[in-house]
Amino acid sequence: MAHWLSYGLSDFLMFSPATYRRMFELHNAAVWPAQIAAAAAAILMVWLLWKRPGWQGRGILLILAAAWAFVGWAFHLERYAAINTAAPWFAVMFFAQAGLLAWAAFRPPVFAVADNAAGRAAAMLLAVALLLQPLAGPLGGRPWTGAEIFAVAPDPTATATMAMLLFGAGRTRWALLVLPLLWCAASGLTLAAMSAPQAMLMPAVGLIVVMVGLLRLRLPVGPPAGWRVRLTCRIPARESAEEEGNMSRLEQIFGALRKQPGDEYIRKAFERYRALMGAGDLDGIVALFAPDARWEEPVGTAPAVGHDAIRARYKAALEGSGGRIPMRADGATRIAGHRALACSIAEVAPDGKPMIVETANVLTFDEAGLITEMLIYVGMGSFKPKE
């Protein structure tokens, strides 16, 4: 036993640090011009995160799945296996992660940038993957031809994946984080054995991911208990300096209640909801909701809970109106913390008869910007013939 304890990590290496660094130069030369496609994929992924089209979640997960599959084959099997007998097992890990990501793309979450500690940490990790890790080698004296970039090298691919998953909603992300976290440990041990200056980077990334994931579970999703907010569709104009001062104090109070996703985000989210309804984009509509969201129309009837039930309700509504329901705003959206009231006028065609319906939607958002509850206030008096 004492004999085995005398070994260090470096004693188990089958290659020198110089050989390891040279491997990335050879790998980059062998896969060129895959780096151009990888850069385009990274830009597309960021665009999807920012713009949030209806196919956002599926697009992001499929990009990540392709990146893990390519790295598993081109790097681990074709390159790393020549100097490390563990590389084929790493390839299996990367192929498994690609499969999990592709599987998740069939029921994708919505990815959203939240302006809170968790959202900022996820954005920082994405910047590390797409900017810092590719520059780390060259800035440390290695040739530019050995730069490690997303979808070509394993470390930035794992970092970018974990960052993107932190932007996602739902519990599925925990299952998708397991293998990237294991790679953080494997990469850290390999670099530590070579006494590389960046040896602690991937373990630190993994630790941050776990901490941010736990933080997201603890973030509040609405105003503190005890607050009661009275909502109306129209607010009278301020008529005096005293009222102006009162409104200023109210804004300070409610400003303290505002947590992410933020007022502007919520306004744009409902604008997007109206646009998707008008386009008849069923997938896009459902993607706005959290996986366990509650939807009730009209208020007082049996609610639909979860994506499948909500999808069925919207599918029936759209099919009953010719595949689309144009909507326009009826007054400004009123926001208090994570809750909002949005009034709309929708054009429907029950039984082929064009009508307009006035609705009031009360929505609750989670920290990822997904709708967790939508209450739709509408009655028989809300329906009027379209002129």
Image (cartoon, grey):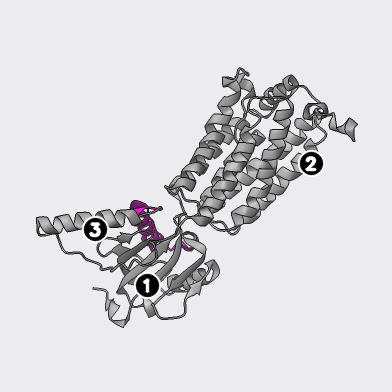
Q: Which residue is mark 3?
A: 250
Percent position (x, y) of residue 34? 62, 32
Kindly identify the residue that appears in the image at 22 percent across and 55 percent down: 249
Give the SS element for disc 3: helix
To which quarter of the image does residue 12 belong?
top right
Mark nearest the camera among 3 and 2 is 3
Specify whether 37 is left or right of 95. left
Residue at the disc numbered 2: 89
Task: Say which mark, if any, is on residue 376.
Answer: 1
| Disc 1 residue type (three-letter) | Ile
Task: Residue at the far left: name it.
Answer: 240
The count of marks equals 3
Circle 1: element type: strand
- Cβ–Cβ below 8 Å for labels 3 and 2? no
- What is the CA distance from the residue labelled 3 to the residue labelled 1? 27 Å
10 Å crowding of disc 2: few (<14), some (14-19), many (20+): some
**In the rendered view, would you say 147 is above or below 257?**
above
